Image (cartoon, rainbow, N blue to C red):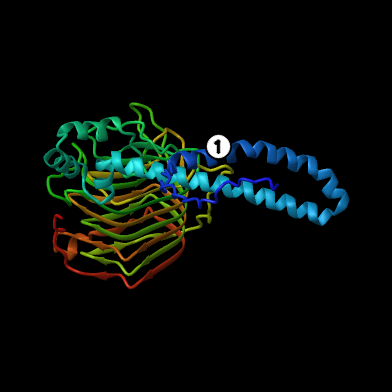
Amino acid sequence: MFKKIWKKPNIPRISIPKPHIPRLHIHLGIPDVLKRWVAIILAIPMNIVRFILAIPMNIARSPIGAYRQLTKFRDYVFSKIEYLNSESEKWKRAFNIAKSPYSFLRMMGFSPQMAIGLLALGSTAGTGVVVNETILAEKSFSNGDAGIYTAPIDTPIFAAQEYNTLRLDLGATSVGLVEIDSISLGTAYSGSALPSGESSVVIVGGLPAVSDPAFTETFLEVGTMYVDRWRCETLTITNSEIHKLVVTSNASDGQSIAAVAGTPRDRGIGGGNRADDMLTSGGYYDQLKITAASSGVNGKVDVLRLTNIYSKGGGCVIDRVKAGTMEVTLNEIGGDSDLATKAFQIATSVIYKSFTNNSNVEVSMAVPAAQ
């Protein structure tokens, strides 16, 4: 008998594919970046520790290799510091520009009055912006803000909305460089006036002695002084000692150059840890004063450069200056169209050791036009 063996029938399987459900990939850019920065910051201490621990072994194995690793580490640290400094400076500049419409207008050459008028008329914030920018904002010599400045401080010791004189008082603290260029003075621009009781738009030098109240005569000591491209109704230089006097290529509505030969010494102004340079460019003022205003204390500046000054309504005066070199070049001086009145004068109280007097001509000139 044969045993019947039952077998399970071979039924083919039908496989039904599972539907493909795509995964949703969400890339969170900012969190990823933050995670990376956190990881980098947390890794810095460990990298420093590893570097310090590896120094003895690296020196023992290879002094040159150790030095190379040290320089690579130094460059890595400095690159991060420089990057952070540059980013910080960019953000600082951006915020200053965003918050300072008044300063921006002054930088563009507008007078304080014109800048205030534009902001008051054109700003939706009205005079609130003006108050914030002109009264609450910090003023400075480098920004061209009017006021009384005492070298070497860049911020004024006095400033007021109605005070539009640029005044710099120099004293025992010497300054390496004072440079003022491209400014308009006096009545040279519309709506301006000289300060009450004043007749000069430019006053540079020391001050005379007076008895009441007591004040001892002062001088302005200068290494090199440049009087370059001034437009004045009159220019007078008096009571000065100049080792090397250069007067060249000036045009004036009458001139009297009568300096006297003598033996003034050459000079340059040192002073060790001198004050920072004081520089400003552009602006409208009723007057410019650079004086030694403290009794018995001479002002000291190594290089005094005054260039491209346009003035009207008064004279330009340089008085009581002791200079190593003074260069008076390319100026236009005059305003009454009368050669007999001598708009340009260098008085007999000016003493020189070396004198160059070249290419100075007399030309009839009318009063400068208002800008």
Question: Of all residues shown, which one is farthest toward the top?
Answer: 213
State whether residue 26 appears in this view. Answer: yes
Quadrant in the picture for residue 207 = top left
Question: Of all residues shown, which one is farthest toward the bottom?
Answer: 359
Q: Is residue 268 left or right of residue 99?
A: right
Q: Position of residue 326 (x, y in %)?
A: 42, 58
Above or below 222: residue 170: above
> What residue is pinned by disc 1?
38
Q: Position of residue 356 (x, y in %)?
A: 41, 68
Quadrant in the picture for residue 242 = bottom left
Q: Which element type, helix, strand or loop, lies under badge 1?
A: helix
| Amino acid type at image mark 1 | Val
- Nearest the viewer among 194 and 371 is 371
Task: Sort mark 1 into few (<14), some (14-19) or many (20+) by Cα contacts within 10 Å.
Answer: few
State whether residue 145 appears in this view. Answer: no
Above or below 41: residue 13: below
Q: Position of residue 253 (x, y in %)?
A: 20, 64
Q: Position of residue 32 (x, y in %)?
A: 49, 41
Q: Is residue 224 left or right of residue 371?
A: right
Q: How many marks?
A: 1
Residue depicted at 33% across the width and 73% down the height: 359
Residue depicted at 69% across the width and 41% down the height: 47
- Nearest the viewer among 311 and 82 is 82
